[in-house]
Image (cartoon, rainbow, N blue to C red):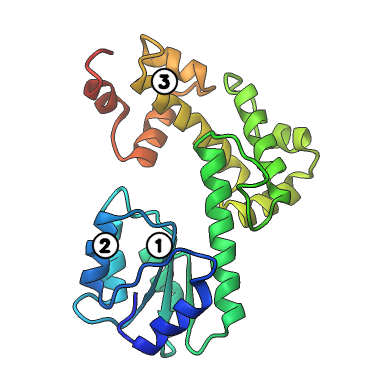
Amino acid sequence: MDDNLEMIAYLKEIFLDTLECTFAFNGAEALAKIKEQTFDLIISDLRMPLLSGAEFKEALNKIDAQKDIPFIMITAVFYNKLEDLKNTLNLNEYIEKPFSKDEILSRVQNILERTLNRKKILNLEPVTQDEVNFDSSSADLVEKIKECILSNLTNPEFNVTMLSKMCGYEQKKLNQILKSKLGLSIVNIILEVRLLKAYEYIVKSRFPTLNEVMYAVGINSRSYFSKKFEERFGLKVGELRKKNTYL
């Protein structure tokens, strides 16, 4: 998203042969396109008419289905609070003009690889070598991590130490790899898989009581489960149960 025709032409030249790109010339137009299509990555200029890049991202953050789309902000001037802006708006990256083709390609490649790997493990889908286009060597590790967590799902004692040993890595090294490849720590990955399975069990009415759901995903504390569930999905576990009237 950019109102500068030269910048749009430059980005088009860089990405058009490898990625399917959609362009918008202002923030309002971009927001409209977001509501019509699904995107894996957004690149936006900070200074834009109608809606600035920051205002555009703020609007996205209010839409549950769009708030987690990876987002790169481009700025033409030095801004000494860029890191604060990144944290406040939940940006994945920011990049200052002028930038090289290799620089933005590297940023985009890393984000898309991380997004793909994260989607595969957290959506509990099988990972194939062909699907991991940027770094096929990570596919086996992602699949192994997923299998280890799921095979120990009911075990509340299953932790980062056990997962690291099962994967054949030192805990610190595995954490570094996962931070790089998925943007999540080992602890967060285990919790995320547990919560996603709990959500699935509740929606599909797999168990008659919440205690049984918690047992099935290896969480013993009702208060901890309720807190983390609401943080993750934006609604209380009881609200989800009520939405599924057959429960």
N-terminal of the two: label 3 or label 1?
A: 1
Q: Secondary structure at mark 2?
A: helix
- Type of the residue with mark 2: Lys
- Residue to which mark 2 is pinned: 33
Q: Residue at x 65, y 29 (%)?
A: 147
| Residue 148 place in picture, x, y as percent | 67, 29
User: Can you name the residue that lies furthest to the front here?
Assistant: 17
Q: Residue at x 28, y 13 (%)?
A: 247
- Residue to which mark 3 is pinned: 201
Vertical comparison of 25 with 124: above or below: below
Q: Is residue 23 left or right of residue 158?
A: left
N-terminal of the two: label 3 or label 2?
A: 2
Callout 1: 10 Å neighbours few (<14), some, many (20+)? some
Along the viewing direction, whichever of 131 and 185 lies nearer the viewer: 131
User: CA–CA distance between discs 1 and 2?
Assistant: 20 Å
User: Can you name the residue that lies furthest to the top here?
Assistant: 208
Vertical comparison of 127 with 59: above or below: above
Q: Residue at x 30, y 73 (%)?
A: 24
Q: Residue at x 64, y 22 (%)?
A: 151
Closer mark to the observer between disc 3 and disc 1: 3
Dot label at residue 23: none
Q: Is residue 19 left or right of residue 34?
A: right
Along the viewing direction, whichever of 22 and 192 lies nearer the viewer: 22
Vertical comparison of 241 with 17: above or below: above
| Residue 80 place in picture, x, y as percent | 43, 85
- Residue to which mark 1 is pinned: 90
- Type of the residue with mark 1: Asn
Callout 2: 10 Å neighbours few (<14), some, many (20+)? some
User: CA–CA distance between discs 3 and 1?
Assistant: 30 Å
Vertical comparison of 213 with 140: above or below: above
